[in-house]
Image (cartoon, coloured by chain):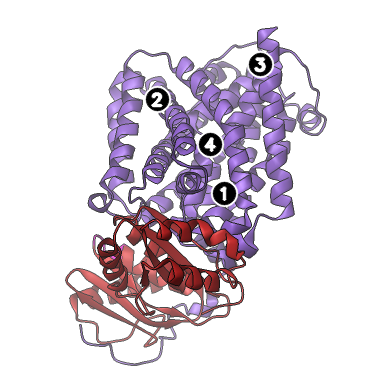
Chain colours: A red, B purple
Amino acid sequence: MKPKDQIDEWWIKALLGEAEAAHPVFGSDVDVSVEDNVITLTGQVATRDQFEELDDEARAIGRGREVVNRVIVLGADDVQHMQTVLALFGSEEQARLACQLVSSSPSRHEGPPQVVSQPSTAESRLKDLARPAGVQPRDVERVIDRVRHGKTLLIDRVPEDDAFRVISELEGTAAELVQTLPPEPESTE
Amino acid sequence: MAPLLKEEPRADVEQPEKISSFRHFVRIAGPGIISGGGDNDPAGIATYSKVGATWGFAQLWLLLLTIPLLIAVQGTAARLGSVTKLGLAELIRNEYGPVVAMSVGLLVVAANVATIGADLVAMAAVLQLLTGFKLIFFIVPLVVVMGYVTIFQNFKTIQRLFLWLIVIFLGYVVAGILAHPNWGAVLLGTVSPRIHFGPVYLAGVVAVLGTTISPYLLFWQTSGEREERRGVERMADIYLDIGSGMVMSNFIAFFIVVATGATLFQHHHSIQTAADAARALQPVAGPAATILFSVGILGSGLLAIPILSVSTGYVVAGTLGWPMGLGRQALTAPGFYSVITLALLAGVELAISGFSPIKALFYSQILDGIVMPPLLVLTMILAARTRLMGAYTSSRLERLGGWSAVAIMTLADLALLYNLVR
């Protein structure tokens, strides 16, 4: 049997809950579970290519099912810089709802985002985050100003990969503005 | 499902560390190489064919010149997406305000819809040429197929399909060879620019620049990095992807000009559309060249029209702050997918309404020509802004290439305008 056929056969068994062996390529380094039409991948691989390969396999074979890839890439080629996502809301309630949504993702490893309504807290927090991101403290004034005018700020510092997901989730909320601080060159996960 | 039994990977199956560099390349091939493919849409093929038929090989040098410019421009757009994790339309709205975002957005949407209409007619005309049935019968089925793939398939599947479509473009290389060009003249036209200041020549220059450096590709590239989730440490992969895409794009365009320059220019054939070019090739280069040319037009449309409609979705959803992305299902991004559908339907309306496809192509190129220099200026400023980009602002080469593109496109626009007014 060709390697691809063996992998496909393994995936079909895995989706049916009948796989007794480990993944033919990645062995016991990765686990797959299926619940409520959601395929969750966990474990670890050595490189980004392998991560993508596993992700491709799951999406190709699990057509129509949601794939949650929680596999960790161990290789040095996959440096993840920390990055801060900011979102402004018209009310604290809206921001808390968005916070719940962002926190509920199964692939999230960080704690929940911070919700800030006080201008002084926003100022000190943002100025702390600006420096490692290579941004001048005055450059975050625009956001602080909007908190001074009654907006609520959601601050979420996550690895870059998560930043893509967080932004995508925030787009479906009542956020009036979603933006990021640049990735932090010195902070990696 | 219970955790799987712990055991070692099987020895008879390819192991992870054996992933080859070719497979690595295939894996990183993404928005950049697809941009390159989408750059040669049927409207672009018409432009290159017309340039070849009108000027022979005299404007081939432009295709060499635009490679570094294209790489710099698309690289800057990719950098914006990779660093900020936002689309270009969102960035313009956040940084320049809703009025600027909407003004740019409207022009790009209008140009995209006009191009979709012109591309649809070009594809249907080619099917008419190949089958003998009237082109009107092909327009709706073509859109249904493209709409289905774009709306109901996920980003990875769409990307894989697009990558296969790019292979079809190799037919142009064969068509170019079948046309038996004078390779000495081809080389001369490529490396030795002969510039005329007449309106026809300048119109050709503007059309080539406008076709190769298109607004919709900037939006596609920026949002594509978001869809691909490529962070700042993957800039080398991003550049390999973009570099391959842009070189391939101009390589194919080069052979389209060579094919038409060696045949239609020599025989003084005048053409207006890509289908005209395919038809006119038959008596001078043989039926094989015509078929290859025609299949290329079909493939290019199948690739470009979804990109144009998705870019329109990125522009509108980004400007209005709607959820967007091909990674989302239609129900979670209804606005984004509605815009894609409407863009396709507007293209169909334009294609079947009797509005001349040549006029649609002309207006889309004019709109692209108007919007591209200011859009590029906004993009270049954004990518150099420390507030947004921190330590990842645009590189010197990106700035050099990007601002050169702004200067060249503006000069070409002004020269054409001056000549037309005079």
Kindly report the distance in space between the C-alpha atoms of the residues bearing marks 4 and 1.
11 Å
Give the CA distance from mark 1 to mark 3: 28 Å
Q: CA distance from mark 2 to mark 3?
A: 26 Å
For label 2, the crowd category at 10 Å Cα-Cα, with few meaning under 14, some 14 to 19 and many 20 or more, is many
Q: CA distance from mark 4 to mark 2?
A: 17 Å
Sequence-earlier tag: 4 or 1: 1
Amino acid found under the numbered disc labelled 4: Pro
State which region is magenta: A60-64
* Residue at 44% in and 18% down: B357
Residue at the farthest top position:
B422
Main secondary structure of the magenta stretch: loop
Residue B2's tag is: none
Q: Which residue is mark 1?
A: B77
- First reached walking from the N terminus: tag 2 or tag 3: 2
What amino acid does circle 2 point to? Gly
- Image position of A117 with respect to B135: above or below: below
Instruction: Identify the mark at residue B417; answer none if there is no mark.
Output: 3
Residue that appears at 80% across and 28% down: B193
Q: Secondary structure at mark 4?
A: helix
Going from N to C along the chain, the mark reached first, 1 or 2, is 1
Same chain, marks 4 and 2?
Answer: yes
